[in-house]
Amino acid sequence: MNSSLCLRLALVVAMLTSVAAVPPQEATLGPRAAAYLARALGTAQSNYYLADEVDWQGLYRRAFDAAAGAQAPSDTYAALRQAFGELSHTFVQFSAAALDAEADGREARGLPDWREPEATANVGTRSPFAERREPAVASLNFADMRLGHVIIPSFGGSPAASTRFAQTLQDQVRAVEESGVCGWVVDLRGNGGGNMWPMLVGVGPVLGEGVVGSFEVGGKPAGNWFYRDGVSGTEGENGFVGARLAGPAYRLETAPPVAVLIDGGTGSSGEALAIAFKGRADTRFFGVPTAGYSTSTNGFRMDDGVNLVIAVGLDVDREGTAYPREVQPDVTVDYAAVDDLDAQMRAAATWLAEVCAR
């Protein structure tokens, strides 16, 4: 055990023993449980991008209070969920085996048998469009102009599923573009996140090729996002390929005007995709502010396989602007039904038609 962990354990033990109102047998954690919880909280403290703004002493205290009586690491899971829930875009992922161990421990301690769903960063419930599951691309006629409308929902899946998602989206974009459109609505409403890379590949022909954003960790660049020739990922020392097409990429002959729709359900990787359009020529954002999870996350595995997903940095657009909070629309338009188009779609289509008419 390293010295910093020892210090944290000493701190929490001192805090716990100072509370006379808590019965000693309930306030005491077994050494394995205490070490596990301290290590998990220490990992968050060492890596969370807003660590300087957190009352860590209070967070440790609340977590150890919530874990009173824990003996095994799995007995601390509920306290860990609570503590990580206090940090933005930071959560815990549990395997089925870990949840089984937690249930067994609760039964042995005479606690109710229950299962809490795995925490996620999906924030789609903040949007009336949260139930979207499949990408969809269509054309619409508006003010004597033909426009493309691409819906990109949340996505998470295997590498094979990522390839299918990206390929399906590009194929649909190609079919609509070849029918003749003068501008595009990129609809990210309700996109609560997941895997950003197949999303970038799928909408790549509309977005355009090149560097489209980056990550920033500890105030320093940590990899540029790119889309090129049917491939997306990051560049730099630790660069990687995030997704690629199964076949050749499609390219538009000219860069069209783009209206991006966002709302309170646009979060996490959905926000990253929105940020990839920031700074693009002839692009305007419509709707309401996003969820405010425009931060990059890393996973940190504990010995039992539990994954600590921690916000470690910020998303940055192609012009170097970082996004610690919500992505703001250029034109604020609230939800409302207007004829066959909702108010946000109508505002976006009106602007695109004006640009196309120039």
Image: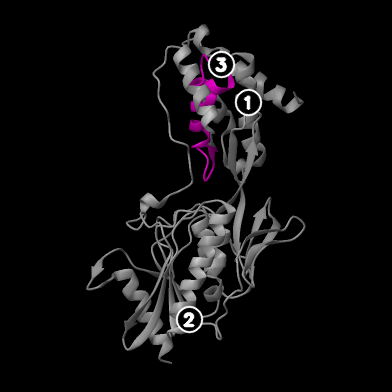
How far apart, in angstroms, are the residues tagged by discs 1 and 3? 13 Å
Q: Position of residue 302 (x, y in %)?
A: 64, 31
* Badge 1 element: helix
Please tell me which residue is depicted at 54% across the width and 30% down the height of the picture.
Answer: 59
* Front position among marks 1 and 3: 1
* Badge 3 element: helix
Q: Front-most of 69 and 219? A: 69
Q: Which mark is residue 16?
A: 3
Q: Front-most of 42 and 248? A: 248
How far apart, in angstroms, are the residues tagged by discs 3 and 2? 60 Å
Q: How is the image coloured?
A: one colour
How far apart, in angstroms, are the residues tagged by discs 2 and 1? 51 Å
Describe residue 182's horizontal placement relative to residue 343 as left or right: right
Describe residue 133's horizontal placement relative to residue 37 as left or right: left
- Label 2: which residue? 257
* Badge 2 element: loop
Describe residue 234's horizontal placement relative to residue 358 as left or right: right
Please tell me which residue is depicted at 57% across the width and 27% down the height of the picture.
Answer: 60
Q: Position of residue 159 (x, y in %)?
A: 59, 54
Q: Position of residue 334 (x, y in %)?
A: 31, 64
For the residue marked with disc 1, what is the amino acid? Ala
Precedes in sequence: disc 1 or disc 3: 3
